[in-house]
Image (spheres, rainbow, N blue to C red):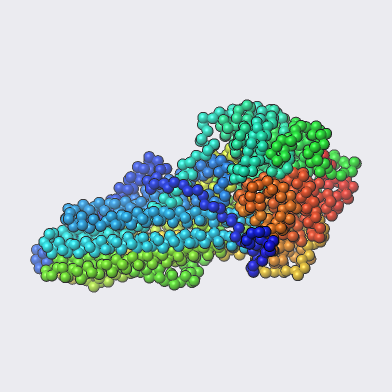
């Protein structure tokens, strides 16, 4: 049956279910925001991880490799020296005084040797770590820059087909994996190579037969290691891809936060994000389970192989095939080899993760765009100058995302140099597509577009676009200063007086002059109105003095006065250049040299305004629909706005603004270098960063216990993981103990086999224990980490979606910064799991090492314990250094990520400005700070690592000197001294290994502080807080003596003079210049912001008292200036407008009212057509109609329209306006409009100027008043 919808119970908002006739029920909560996985790229080989290294970096890596191998060589050499003494003792006994004197002398010499080895280990480790980190940082910086460069080079077709996968999430998540794999991790692997080679040389020299027997089983380990790499790479890729899709959901919500709030979509997005994170969690769980099993099997095989080796060595000694001392040498060498081999699975796992992470990034870098790029068009013709002749010849085109939907069908038109040509027609008729083809965003399927007789496909794309100035439907400004945004439009220096003249021409100079910082005012989200942004975009287009000017609804967001003045300026600017105009407001193009009327991709009419109007065809109908009735006596010469007292007489014009006076004194203006821009941003954010650090320190000490408490549901798994770590900590000491006992057994006279077999039989049990403990540790901790990370991300995302709008306006809370925090939450559970695991492993290793030492020599053990403070100091130094590095680099990394996100999100604008290279250099400049911090981390913070690495040699050195002294005084015997040294050696190695513990703690604490800083933030306007809910919502509203200033603005919008009343079930229109506060009224009604002073009420109750979700916004619907659609189907986007039950019929009805059905009918998939990111697969008018349908299906009592029809053609506007008028019956409507024909039938019209209402009445009353409104009408009448 035709579907019904059953809302589910929810504290905030019930999910919506759409039923489709003749189909199964479809839940809106099952909307496929997540795209299908990207096409598989060919897997890159391991060696290709370093393909971006320079010759100099290869040289440094070779040095680092040799240093790593040297560090690996030292350990077996050192252990062999101890082995010599053990062999000597067991060979000759302790009764010979002369021999004992020789041994103590040898101990002294070897003590000096070990002191030298301690220094050598320090140097080798320092060189190895610092160079590996330094070269990895340089390569990853280069990779990230190349990746962004290649992304920005991609055709727009490529972006259309990406379907929501977050490219910047790969920079945030995958790049650290690459860095870890090709950096410090390689030091460990090369150290193993050094150990392997040295141990094999020593072993082969002692007994080639025993060595070969032990090596014969190594292929099992090699095969297992290969399996680890393959499995880890596959699971890392699955996890990375899943998170990229989840990050895309979060980015959509944060990018469209105003739409999310207006339609109370918070819970839906939280659920969608949670659902997408389940895929990430499951992938991470499987990854942990498989990795734990693989590493456990590796350790088990290793111990079983050595168990066999011990047995075989015993057989050879018993059969006199090898002397005892040689067997000892081989076994000790293999022990060192085994200890080193145990770290190989982790190294291989990191390498596999790096390979998987690099797969998509490297393939994107390696695959150039099919038709364009920053460096890919060198052979094409460059345009030094352009006359401006443009020709479209039989052009056919379909967008790549919808190849079966033709947009242009054989368009042919010739535009002569210097002509102004306008394209008009219905939304989706192909108007904007003509501009896109001319700018080479896309290429025609057949036919061609030419400039000055040259096919644009044969012209260097950068030189083509540098000769074109463009202003789009939805103006895009970047997170720069106003001056920098305008100067983005030109690649040449500009004289200050010309710069000011252009800004005056674009009608943006006056409002910019009122900012205290003038043109140096940094732009933040929500700071400017749509009209103000559009005027700055126009100035940016005009500043380059282009030969070809493209205006796609360039004045749609401007008020009448600004539009008239800007249009006059554009008309003047059009002289001597070719201008293509797309306009729905036909008054702006009546003076065009030629007007082309498009209908469904076909050119149906062509001529001047008078010629076309006389034909009484489609164009005539469009014009008639926009006529206004005004009195004949209206004085067009009257000032448009009456004089309003200036709030500050000190700023009458730009001459009074210090920044502008200083700017005028400069010889010329040029876009600041990316380095200067990055420095400016860092200075602006420095004070805020200091404040955050002070706040963070107040709760820092509680982080561990808070995370521990958060894991209460997983406490059983945490205990099992900790138990597994504890048993893992006993494996190596147990192995060393069994080895020592086996060696002692075969050296003593008597039944060698029986004595040795007693210990060898324990080895298989130890091997099985190793498998189970390591598997349990990794598997359980991975499950805990995955589950807790998901909960934290959901909690963080949920709290983000309850913050006040001012929070998102702050530059420090840009989308890139917030998505980075969502990604960084995965480090929080490691504060407990990794720390507990490392601590348990460390404790048991130390315990099993110190116990035998005390048993054999209490005095010597006590002396060696004095080294512990030294090692702990090195560990503390390392922890402090790492914490400082993480804290210092956080803001720098966030800023760089935000630049990358902004560049990728606004790639079309960058291409139009031919500023891709600037965006890349700007990103590179922002990377300079984190790179310099990483460089310091590499060369300064490697010192404590070196000190910790020398702990083993230092222990043996001190032990030999102290042991000699105790032996000389008769307080100890050689066997006790050597056993104590070996036991303490194991313990000191473990304590030195607490570097891993320190690292885990530092990283986890930093991640926790960042994550909980957002989770704990209390919003100033809590939309989920319960409040007043009227049983019968009244939609009348009133503002009295209003005072309001945006959180990020310097100057207030309202200064206490704003008073406005809206009657229930009546329509009220707000008109006035851009920036006067019209859109602010909607923000206050929606309670995105709270007024500073005065009263704001709805239904007689203060807006502050309402339950925002259940009492206020649920009764409102909004259509904004820049409609935001989500990457779902058309039907799903419309359905998400309703919090109540909707059916397919409801969707179709709303779509029909908003004139959506007219273009949906021509799409093969109809209402199931995906709209793409931000509705990128649709035209501006199509997006706006869907947004209107989304508002209408909500059936609100208070309908808010902020330029709701600005992007619509005349036909659609008339039809949609009828629907809105019909929908307005019986409800209160507030409409902001610059196109006055849309509001002439409203019950009341308020003219707002300079923060107060200057005229109020109906259309006829205001026309008769012959004041401001009458002049506006006269200027728009065709």
Horizontal relation, residue 961 to residue 919: left or right: left
Instruction: Name the residue at 69% across, 30% down.
Output: 415
Tell me if I can see residue 648 in this picture.
no
- Is residue 724 at least partly visible in the picture? yes
Q: Quadrant of the C terminus?
A: top right
Q: Residue at x 31, y 54 (%)?
A: 222
Q: Is residue 314 above or below residue 430?
A: below
The quadrant in which residue 1115 appears is bottom right
- Which residue is depicted at the point 65% across and 27% down? 387
Q: Residue at x 81, y 43 (%)?
A: 626
Residue 260: where, in percent of width, then height? 65, 57
Q: Position of residue 165 (x, y in %)?
A: 54, 51
Which quadrant would the N terminus be assigned to in this image? Answer: bottom right
Would you place residue 704 above or below residue 682 in this image? below
Q: Which image quadrant for residue 550?
A: top right
Against 1054, is 842 above or below? below
Residue 521 vs residue 316, the one in the foreground: 316
Instruction: Relative to 691, say whether 627 is above or below.
Output: above
Residue 86 or residue 27, whichever sits in front: 27
């Amino acid at each position: 049956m035709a579907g019904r919808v059953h809302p589910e119970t929810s504290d905030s908002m019930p999910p919506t279910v759409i039923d489709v006739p003749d189909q199964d029920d479809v839940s809106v909560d099952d909307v496929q925001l997540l795209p299908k996985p990207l096409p598989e790229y060919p897997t890159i080989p391991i060696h290709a991880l370093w393909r971006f290294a320079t010759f100099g970096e290869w040289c440094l890596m070779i040095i680092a490799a040799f240093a790593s191998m040297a560090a690996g060589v030292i350990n077996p050499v050192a252990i062999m020296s101890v082995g010599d003494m053990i062999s000597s003792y067991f060979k000759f006994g302790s009764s010979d005084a002369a021999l004992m004197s020789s041994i103590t002398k040898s101990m002294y010499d070897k003590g000096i040797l070990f002191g030298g080895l301690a220094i050598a280990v320090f140097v080798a480790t320092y060189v190895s770590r610092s160079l590996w980190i330094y070269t990895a940082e340089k390569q990853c910086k280069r990779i990230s820059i190349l990746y962004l460069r290649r992304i920005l080079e991609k055709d727009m077709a490529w972006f259309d087909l990406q379907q929501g996968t977050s490219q910047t999430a790969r920079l945030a998540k995958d790049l650290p994996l690459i860095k870890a794999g090709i950096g410090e991790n390689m030091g460990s692997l090369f150290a193993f190579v050094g150990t392997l080679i040295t141990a094999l040389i020593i072993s082969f020299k002692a007994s080639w037969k025993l060595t070969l027997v032990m090596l014969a089983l190594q292929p099992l380990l090699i095969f297992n290691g290969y399996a680890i790499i393959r499995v880890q790479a596959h699971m890392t890729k699955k996890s990375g891809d899943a998170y990229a899709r989840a990050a895309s959901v979060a980015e959509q919500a944060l990018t469209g936060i105003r739409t999310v709030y207006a339609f109370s979509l918070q819970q839906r997005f939280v659920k969608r994000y949670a659902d997408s994170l389940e895929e990430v969690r499951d992938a991470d769980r499987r990854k942990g389970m498989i990795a734990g099993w693989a590493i456990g099997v590796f350790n088990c095989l290793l111990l079983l192989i050595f168990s066999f080796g011990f047995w075989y060595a015993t057989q050879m000694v018993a059969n006199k095939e090898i002397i005892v001392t040689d067997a000892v040498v081989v076994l000790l060498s293999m022990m060192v080899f085994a200890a080193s081999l145990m770290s190989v699975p982790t190294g291989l796992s990191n390498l596999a993760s790096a390979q998987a992470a690099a797969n998509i990034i490297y393939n994107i870098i390696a695959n150039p765009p099919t038709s364009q790029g920053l460096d890919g068009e060198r052979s094409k013709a460059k345009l030094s100058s352009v006359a401006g002749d443009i020709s479209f010849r039989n052009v056919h085109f379909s967008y790549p995302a919808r190849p079966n939907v033709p947009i242009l069908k054989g368009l042919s038109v010739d535009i002569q140099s210097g002509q102004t040509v306008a394209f008009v027609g219905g939304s989706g008729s192909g108007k904007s597509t003509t501009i896109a083809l001319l700018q080479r965003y896309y290429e025609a399927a057949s036919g061609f577009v030419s400039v000055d007789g040259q096919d644009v496909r044969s012209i260097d794309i950068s030189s083509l676009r540098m000769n074109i100035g463009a202003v789009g439907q939805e103006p895009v400004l970047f997170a720069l200063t106003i001056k920098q945004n305008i100067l983005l439009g030109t690649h040449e220096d500009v004289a200050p007086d010309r710069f000011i003249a252009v800004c005056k021409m674009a009608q943006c100079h006056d409002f910019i002059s009122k900012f205290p910082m003038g043109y140096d005012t940094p732009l933040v989200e929500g700071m400017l109105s749509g009209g103000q942004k559009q005027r700055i975009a126009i100035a940016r287009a005009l500043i380059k003095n282009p030969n070809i000017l493209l205006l796609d609804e360039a004045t749609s967001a401007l008020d009448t006065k600004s539009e008239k003045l800007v249009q006059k300026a554009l008309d003047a600017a059009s002289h001597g250049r070719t201008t293509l105009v797309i306009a729905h407001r036909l008054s702006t193009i009546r003076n065009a040299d030629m007007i082309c009327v498009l209908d469904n991709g076909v050119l149906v009419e062509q001529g001047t305004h008078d010629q076309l109007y006389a034909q009484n065809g489609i164009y005539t109908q469009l014009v008639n629909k926009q006529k206004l009735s005004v009195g004949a006596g209206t004085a067009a010469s009257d000032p448009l706005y009456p004089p309003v007292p200036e709030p500050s007489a000190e700023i009458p014009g730009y001459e009074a603004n210090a920044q502008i006076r200083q700017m005028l004194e400069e010889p010329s203006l040029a876009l600041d270098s990316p380095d200067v821009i990055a420095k400016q941003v860092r200075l602006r954010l420095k004070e805020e960063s200091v404040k955050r650090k002070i706040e963070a320190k107040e709760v820092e000490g509680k982080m561990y216990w808070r995370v521990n408490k958060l894991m209460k549901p997983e406490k059983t798994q945490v205990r099992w993981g900790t138990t597994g770590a504890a048993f893992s900590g006993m494996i190596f000491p147990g192995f060393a103990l069994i080895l020592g006992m086996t060696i002692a057994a075969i050296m003593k006279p008597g039944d060698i086999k029986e004595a040795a077999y007693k210990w060898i039989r324990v080895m298989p049990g130890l091997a099985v224990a190793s498998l189970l403990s390591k598997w349990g540790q990794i598997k359980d901790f991975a499950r805990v980490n995955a589950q807790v990370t998901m909960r934290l991300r959901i909690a963080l995302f949920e709290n983000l979606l309850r913050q006040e709008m001012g929070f998102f306006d702050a530059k420090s809370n840009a989308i890139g910064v917030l998505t980075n925090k969502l990604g960084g939450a995965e480090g929080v559970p490691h504060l407990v799991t990794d720390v507990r695991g490392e601590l348990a492993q460390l404790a048991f290793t130390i315990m099993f090492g110190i116990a035998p030492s005390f048993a054999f020599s209490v005095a010597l053990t006590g002396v060696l314990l004095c080294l512990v403070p030294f090692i702990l100091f090195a560990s503390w130094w390392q922890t402090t250094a790492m914490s400082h590095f993480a804290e210092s680099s956080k803001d720098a990394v966030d800023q760089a990520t935000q630049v990358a996100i902004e560049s990728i999100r606004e790639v079309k604008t960058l291409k139009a400005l031919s500023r891709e290279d600037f965006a890349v250099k700007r990103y590179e400049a922002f990377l300079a700070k984190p790179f310099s911090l990483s460089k310091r981390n590499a060369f300064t913070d490697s010192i404590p690592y070196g000190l910790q690495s020398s702990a083993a040699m230092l222990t043996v050195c001190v032990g030999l000197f102290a042991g000699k002294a105790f032996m000389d005084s008769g307080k100890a015997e050689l066997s006790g001294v050597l056993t104590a040294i070996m036991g303490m050696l194991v313990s000191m190695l473990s304590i030195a290994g607490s570097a891993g513990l320190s690292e885990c703690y530092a990283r986890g604490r930093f991640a926790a502080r960042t994550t909980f800083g957002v989770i704990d933030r209390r919003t100033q306007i809590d939309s989920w807080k319960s409040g007043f809910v009227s049983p019968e919502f009244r939609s009348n509203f009133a503002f009295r003596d209003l005072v309001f200033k945006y959180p990020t603005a310097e100057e207030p919008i309202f200064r206490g003079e704003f008073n406005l009343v809206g009657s229930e079930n009546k329509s009220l229109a707000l008109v006035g210049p851009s920036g006067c506060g019209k859109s602010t009224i909607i923000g206050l009604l929606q309670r995105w912001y709270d007024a500073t002073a005065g009263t704001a009420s709805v239904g007689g109750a203060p807006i502050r008292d309402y339950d925002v979700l259940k009492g206020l916004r649920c009764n409102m619907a909004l259509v904004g200036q820049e409609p935001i659609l989500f990457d779902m189907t058309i039907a799903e986007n419309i359905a998400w407008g309703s919090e109540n039950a909707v059916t397919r019929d409801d969707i179709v009805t709303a779509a029909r009212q908003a004139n959506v059905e007219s273009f949906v009918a021509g799409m093969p998939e109809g209402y199931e057509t995906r709209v793409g990111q931000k509705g990128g697969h649709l035209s501006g008018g199509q997006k706006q109609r869907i947004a209107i349908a989304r508002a209408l299906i909500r059936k609100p009592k208070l309908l808010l329209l902020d330029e709701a029809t600005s992007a619509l053609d005349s036909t659609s506007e008339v039809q949609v306006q009828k629907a809105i008028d019909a929908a307005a019956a019986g409800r209160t409507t507030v409409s902001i409009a610059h196109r006055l024909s849309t509001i002439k039938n409203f019950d009341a019209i308020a003219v707002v100027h300079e923060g107060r209402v200057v005229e109020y009445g109906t259309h006829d009353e205001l026309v008769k008043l012959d004041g401001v409104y009458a002049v506006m009408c006269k200027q728009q009448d065709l």
